[in-house]
Amino acid sequence: MNVRQSILNSEGQCFPGATYTEVVLAPAYDNQKSVLLEPMIAIHKAHLIMLVEQSLLTREQAAPIMDAIRALDLPRIQQTPYDGTFEDLFFLVEHQIMERAGEIGGSCIWPEAATTWALRCIA
C-alpha cells in the first residue's frame, strides 16, 4: 500500500479527517459549548429585536424565530459531542432554529462569516 492510500485509510476519504477532528474540531466545539453558547443565544435574541426595530422583519415574522430560539434545549446542546454533522456550534444552533421556525428562521442568521461570531460573544 502506498503512503497516500495509508493516510486515506486512517484519516478517512472526506473532510474532516480523523486527526483534524480529534485535534481541532472536537476541542473547539467543546470550548464553544462551554464559553460561547449562552452569549450566542443572547446575541441571536438581540439581533432579532434589532431586525424588528429597524422594520426589517415584522413582529409576526419574528415571533416564530424567537419561539425557536427560546425552545433551544441548551443543556442538551451542551451535552452533544462533536460528530462532524455541523462544522461548529454556530451551524448546529442555526440548523435547530430553522428546523423549528422554518425558512424564516434563516432571517436571524448574522450576515457575516461564521468564524467571526465568536468575537461578538467574547467582546
Image (cartoon, rainbow, N blue to C red):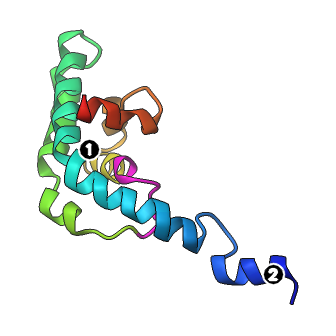
Q: Say which of 31 and 64 sits in front.
A: 31
Q: Is residue 85 magenta?
A: yes
First along the sequence among labels 1 and 2: 2
Query: Where residue 101 is drawn, which disc sits there?
Result: 1
Q: Please, what is the three-letter code of the amino acid marked with disc 2?
A: Gln
Q: Is residue 92 above or below residue 20?
A: above
Q: Mark 2 points at which residue?
A: 5
- Relative to 104, 34 lies left or right: left
Mark 1 to mark 2: distance in Å? 44 Å
Few, some or many residues within 10 Å of mark 2 (<14, 14–19, 20+):
few
Q: Say which of 3 and 77 sits in front.
A: 3
- Residue 44, horizontal then vertical, whole percent: 23, 34
Local SS, label 1 = helix
Q: Is residue 104 visible to the viewer in this orientation of the structure? A: no
Q: Residue furthest right?
A: 2
- Relative to 41, 93 lies left or right: right
Q: Say which of 113 and 1 sits in front.
A: 1
Which of discs 1 and 2 lies nearer the camera? The answer is 2
Q: Quadrant of the C terminus?
A: top left
Q: Is residue 8 above or below residue 45?
A: below
- Residue 85, horizontal then vertical, whole percent: 45, 64
Residue located at (21% from left, 55% from top): 34
Q: Magenta residues?
A: 83-91
Residue located at (23% from left, 25% from top): 47
Q: Is residue 17 magenta?
A: no
Residue located at (48% from left, 66% from top): 23
- Relative to 73, 7 lies left or right: right
The image quadrant of residue 7 is bottom right
Q: Is residue 97 visible to the viewer in this orientation of the structure? A: yes
Query: Where residue 111 is drawn, which disc sits there?
Result: none
- Residue 86, horizontal then vertical, whole percent: 44, 58
Local SS, label 2 = helix
